[in-house]
Every structure is written in structure tokens, then in C-alpha cells.
Image (spheres, grey):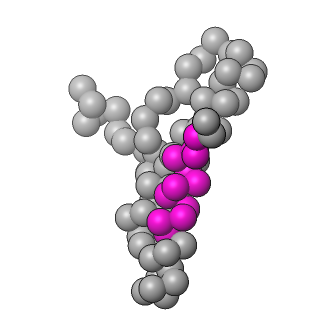
Amino acid sequence: MTTIPLIGVLVLIAAVALVFSGRYPRGLFGFVIGVNRWFYRVLAYSALLTDEYPPLRLDQGPREPSETAAA
């Protein structure tokens, strides 16, 4: 049995939305980019085997959360 990756399903949904509305939904775009960034971050960590863990959160943009808000 073949499984379809999550990113493929999300891009297919975006393509259908693009065909019918003529726009790429902004929320879906942010989610797809976040999943893609997370995947490559984890892949790079596992391939390079560094001692520093990647941030395992779904990154949705260039802004980093402040450390004072987390405390």
C-alpha cells in the first residue's frame, strides 16, 4: 500500500482552491511553508547529527517568538 505524504495532500488542496478561486489561501500557504520548514529542519538535524536540537515547532514565518513571552 502506498501512502501519500502530507505535503502532497496540502498542495493538492491548494491547487484545487487555486483553480476555483484564483487565489492561494493565505492560511494554507503559511501551513504548507511551516510543514516544509519543519521537515527540512528535522532532516538536516538527523543527517548532520549535531548536538543542538532543532526547534520542533511549526514555524509560520520569519518572526521568532520572544523568550520573555515563554517565561
| Viewport quadrant of the C terminus | top left
Name the residue located 66 percent from the left edge and 24 percent from the top edge: 45
Q: Position of residue 13 (x, y in %)?
A: 47, 66
Q: Position of residue 8 (x, y in %)?
A: 58, 54
> Quick check: 32 above or below 51?
below
Left or right of residue 42, residue 35 in this image: left
> Quick check: 4 above or below 10?
above
Name the residue located 64 percent from the left edge and 12 percent from the top edge: 51
Q: Residue furthest right?
A: 48
Residue 60 shows in the view: yes
Name the residue located 52 percent from the left edge and 55 percent from the top edge: 9
Q: Where is residue 38 in the image (x, y as percent from the top left)?
A: 54, 39
From the image, give the main secondary structure of the stretch colored magenta: helix
Towards the viewer: 27 or 6: 6
Magenta residues? 3-14
Left or right of residue 10, residue 49 in this image: right
Say if the magenta span includes residue 4: yes
- Residue 26: name its quadrant: bottom left
> Quick check: 21 above or below 64?
below
Left or right of residue 67, residue 58 in this image: right
Towards the viewer: 63 or 20: 20
| Viewport quadrant of the N terminus | top right
Residue 61 shows in the view: no
